Image: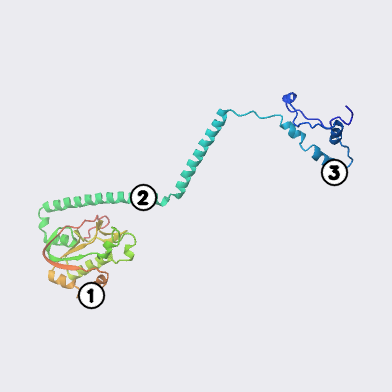
Amino acid sequence: MGVDELPSKRRAVFSKAVAGLGPWHADVEEDEQVLARRRHRKVDDDSLRLIDDLTNRPLDPLFSDALLTQQKPRSTFSVWFTRVIVFIICVAVGSIGSVFVRQLNTDPRKQVRASLVSELQQQNTSLNKLTTQVTDLHSQVVKKADSMPDTTDDPVLQQDEMANGALKVKGPGIVMTVADPIASAGKNGGLGPRDGNASSHIRVVTDSDLQDIVLLLWKAGAEAISINGYRIGVSTSVRTAGQTILIGVNQVASPYKIEAIGNPKDLADQMGSGSQPELYRSLNAAGINPQISKSHSLKLDAAEAANVTYAKRSK
């Protein structure tokens, strides 16, 4: 082998399996001298040398050596194990993503409203129990007071207790019935007239209306008044709590039955449309039509007593 036939470069050995390598290119039957001249063409110009290398030796020697180390084929168990792991990871990621999406789409105000409604119901239940207890205790106090000698025969004491609403009373008077308009019951979807937005569209009986009627009855000479069976005493209030009208701590709803003991004729005249045109004009415009009837015998229970803590009897 001449000097021109010697290889211009040597391959690097990266593994021990290089001894078993075979040729990667098929030899073409050509004249050895022609092949030698083609492979080892001597050119002095660097650009021609670069072109010669790209034309006759396009495959990089390092890349050829890298092909020598072929990766062993993977086993079936390894392939399926990898697939199962990837499937489990995808399911876990999808489940966690679904939980996050549901939490993002959930309105937290619903839970707050539900907790507030539950708390309000518990408070109303406890309030009703306490009211029942107060009423029972008051009844016991009245029974004890009735069983006491001498003091129950005091006309001044009886007069004061009847005027303050501490005793049950009976006598003639009038019954005035005030109810919400019929339209309020048909356009609320089964809700009360003060639920939702109904009160902004339909005029209903309010606590102010009941207060005005009670004041007019006192002015007309009524001696005892009750609304839906709850006596109006010295410490009884007529007010609105949320969407509900309360007489003291008791809830009332339409129709409102107002009973007043006094002179039936005078009370009926003073509470009629002729004596109270402004009141009737306001109520009739909203479809509220008060009804007044005379009664020869009305029975009113005692009002709930208030605890006296700071007030002391003066000599």
Quadrant (top left, top right, bottom left, bottom right) of the N terminus:
top right
Residue under label 1, please give it. 277
Where is residue 224, by image quadrant?
Answer: bottom left
Residue under label 3, please give it. 47
Q: Amino acid at mark 3?
A: Ser
Query: Which one is in front, 80 or 279?
Result: 80
Residue 19 visible (yes or no) = yes
In this picture, residue 160 sits left or right of residue 250: left
Q: Amino acid at mark 1?
A: Pro
In this picture, residue 280 sits left or right of residue 146: right
Observer-side mark, 2 or 3, equals 3
Q: Amino acid at mark 2?
A: Ala
Distance Cα–Cα, label 2 vs label 3: 84 Å
Residue under label 2, please give it. 114
Percent of width and height locating residue 263: 13, 69
Q: Earlier in the sequence, mark 3 or mark 1?
A: 3
Where is residue 181, by image quadrant?
Answer: bottom left
